[in-house]
Amino acid sequence: MSRLIPLILAVALFMENMDATVIATSLPAIAADIGTTPVALKLAFTAYFVALAIFIPISAWLADKFGAKTVFRAAILVFIVGSIACALSSSLPEFIMARFLKGMGGAMMSPLARLILLRTTERKDLVNAMAWLTIPALIGPTLGPPVGGFLTTFLSWHWIFIVNVPIGLVGVVLITKYLPEVESAARRPMDFPGFFLSAIAFSGIVFGLSLLSMPVLPIWVAAVSTLAGLVAAAVYVPYALRIEHPLLDPRLFLHPSYRAVVLGTSIFLIGAGATPFLLPLMLQVGFGYTPFESGMITFVGAIGALCMKFIAKPIYQRIGFRTALMTAGVLSALGLAIKGTFVPQTPIIVMMVVIFVVGIVRSLYFTGQNALAFADIDEEEAGPATAIHAVMRPIATALAVATAGGVLEVSSHLRGQPLGVDDFHTAFFVIAAVSLLAIVPYVRLEKEAGSDISGQRTAAQRQAALEKAEQQGYEGRSPRF
């Protein structure tokens, strides 16, 4: 397998994933400059995730109609334009619209990267390819806070968006020069009713859950938005089952591996999505570290993720997807619980070791789930499968932040004191318990699921190898008289 293709795709995903967190440490500076408050500015976060929720579902259809390479390149250009618009924004409405534009570009990048990789990689190389693709998804969010803090402190907040321009242009050049034309699946008619329903469903849920974690609008707005999303989702499912080519096909969940991965990863992401929110906040508010210091502490998780890249494939070959994913799920939940025991007196080196190990475990999980999800998916199903797989991330992330923020608020209220270290401990323990449920969808999965792409030998193959070895052993012996 050529490493060039996943590395090219990783350039775009690194830019997208870092952007999701790089803005966090710059909110006060941006808010002061454009004349608003940091709390109100969080609507820009929501605008980005709402755009993802709306446009991810049509990514596969656009790829089949215009070509995956063409759409992927265009998505990066839209992302670049959105970044420039963010840097030039002088008011809250302008900034929100610019973030929404960036989300339109970002919505195409993640699902199409997986789709291109699926259509250009042999099944036996899929785990290794996905390992390369997973790294930016893990390093980006971790690198975002220290980079954002550094650029904002020593230059200005505008640079956290300007830096996307050269990275994106490099990606466009590499895609144009080295990425092969990707053969499209059979073109399907555009499902406009499905797009309308899915847009309401996913954007309503994401918007509603996001509002729960920030007091920007009245609580009834969040409730109505979430309810509208759930109703639209309930209407969409029977509609999609009645037509031949739905935009997002619920029948994909008939594949055991795909069903287990989408459900399990959605739960796993609650822990993974809450950590970039909880951990820096605990280090800064609870322990008194600066944004840059907390960013440097959490960055070791990215180093752990990178280390796992080199051993992920042998692990999956040795023990298979089911065992590895369940083990990673348990260890990740344990890591969250351990973070809930951190106190200001905890040595920095101890915290960094825990964060490093959790980074390794999460990298193992995301590498495996990215590959196993498509183990039973055929060529025609690949596009819709990548779209459903991708759209769960903004929903799970919004739910993660809403849950973590809600636990912090309730804990602080029950104690009758301002937000403190004990509240963060409670939040980590609750999130750890929820995250542990990620192993449940894998319990009934066959132990050797996805063995054809992991390289794991099945029981039948091991028995055949044993019999062959025994036969060769007998044949190699001299007869005794």
Image: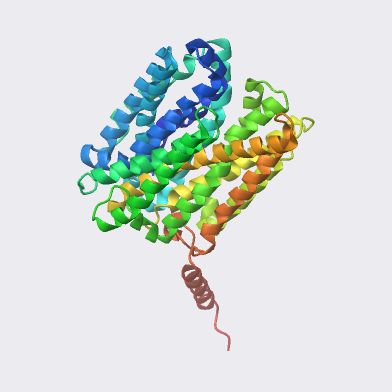
What residue is shown at x 47% (from left), y 56% (from top)? 260
* Most foreground residue, 212 or 317: 212
Quick one: which residue is furthest to the right in this view? Answer: 345
Q: Which of the 4 image quadrants contains residue 1?
A: top left
Report the side of 321 relative to 8 (left or right): right
Pick the residue in front: 255 or 456: 255
Which corner quadrant holds the C terminus? bottom right
Give residue 270's quadrant in the image: top right
Going 69% across and 26% down the picture, which residue do you hit?
Answer: 285
Position of 153 relative to 345 (above/below): above
Residue 318 horizontal/vertical position (percent) = 55, 57
Judged left or right of residue 171, residue 433 is right
How many numbered marks have been drawn onto this rendered protein structure? 0
Residue 381 visible in the current orientation: yes
**Residue 233 in the image, given as x and y percentages of width and height:** 38, 48
469 up-or-down from 302: above or below = below
Residue 417 coordinates in the image, percent (x, y)? 74, 31
Q: Residue furthest bottom?
A: 481
98 vs 433: above or below: above
Q: Is 221 or 17 nearer to us in this picture?
A: 221
Res. 152 image quadrant: top right
Residue, x 39% and y 48% (percent of image)?
231
Its colouring scheme is rainbow
Return the x and y of residue 334 as percentages of the image width and height: 67, 48
Is any atom of residue 117 visible in this view? no
Q: Is residue 361 left or right of residue 372?
A: right
